[in-house]
Image: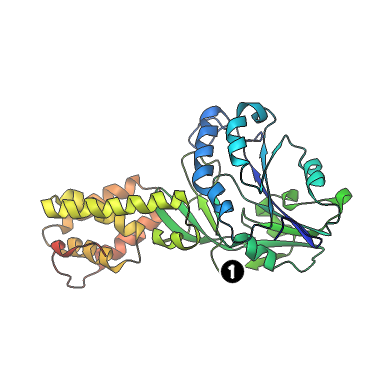
Amino acid sequence: MSQSDARFCHLVITPFNLPSSHSSDRAGNRVGDEAWMAHRMELFRAFTFPAMQAQSCQNFIWLVRFREESRHTHADVIAEWSRFPNFRAIYGSAIFDDIKQIVPPDCRYLITTRIDNDDAFHCRAVERIQQEFSQQEFSFINFKLGYCLREGLATRTESMSSPFLSLVERYEPTTLQTVLCAQHGEVIKRYPVVQIADDRYWLQVIHQRNIANDFNGNLCSVTELNAGFGIPGVHVVLRELQDQYDRAAAAAASGDMTGYLEQLWQLALRLPDDPHTIHALRTVLQSAGNRAYAIRLFANLLTQAPLNPLLHEALTALIAADDGAPSAEAFRRP
């Protein structure tokens, strides 16, 4: 399928390093400087870029927006990304002018989709958006369900007006709107929105240099991400998980109860649906000799964790469980 046809043209829009109203991120680091840019390029390579390359439907043009000076300061890396045929670097803030030059003259409808440069789409996201196309005059489409990922922890989450919105509109160059016509959180308040909820189509990466995003939702196993997001950033998380299994097994074999408890706890958070890990953790907690120590250890971890309410809920449930489990040495990799 070609990148456009007479029915519609589909543009995916990603702002990269455009001027921001925020001068610093939540950690106080400056937004837009070279350190920020290096960090975002790393996330882009690990998550956003490979996810777009992996789309089951390649009938789209991907507009990635840079500051004008990036044409020179980041020419090499942009040239590298431009080897992906769908990738189009555009510079400056006059995006409507660029769109008018890119959209074919016989285009009747325009679909625009937004995604940030540190997030990822499910491999069938573009295909699913286009399945909703029915020559709408003006209609927003939202992926309601997605995942959040932070430091190896994953949650299932949802949003009725997410940062992964699309807009279908009749293409009129003089009255062009695009998905950027409103802040994503305001769209649900101002317009009807078609909700897609048959799968989890996005992955929002929460990191130390976020400006506004929060880590929310219900903990789930990070292995869930592999099905629709088989990209380098997820592969790294899964390799770290395997390493954690190895560390837990080694600590158990050597009698290092402190190390064993710490690894079990981290595994339980990353795999909350895995019966082997939860069983082993309950085993240690229910052992008369370990219970008080384990509770003190986990209480200390709670004060350092980014998800205090969720961790507190998980800890309470685990401590309260009493299923007569066997000894801690029974722990083994599933």
Q: Position of residue 276 (x, y in %)?
A: 26, 66
Spot the residue most to the right: 174
The answer to whether residue 255 is seen in the rendering is no
In this rendering, the answer to whether 131 lies above or below 253 is below
Left or right, 194 with reference to 199: right
Which residue is rendered at x = 17% and y = 51% of the image? Answer: 251
Q: Amino acid at mark 1?
A: Ala
Q: Position of residue 43 (x, y in %)?
A: 50, 42
Which residue is rendered at x = 59% and y = 69% of the image? Answer: 197
Left or right, 304 with reference to 257: right
Quarter of the image where the N terminus is located: bottom right
Q: Assign a secondary structure to mark 1.
A: loop
Which residue is rendered at x = 50% and y = 32% of the image? Answer: 28
Left or right, 92 with reference to 218: right
* Colour setting: rainbow
Which residue is rendered at x = 62% and y = 50% of the image? Answer: 115
Q: For mark 1, what is the residue?
A: 197
Q: Quadrant of residue 164?
A: bottom right
Left or right, 133 with reference to 313: right
The answer to whether residue 64 is seen in the rendering is yes
Q: Quadrant of residue 82?
A: top right
Spot the residue most to the bottom: 323
Q: Position of residue 50 (x, y in %)?
A: 53, 50
- Pick whichever, 190 or 77, lies toward us: 77
- Pick whichever, 101 or 220, lies toward us: 101
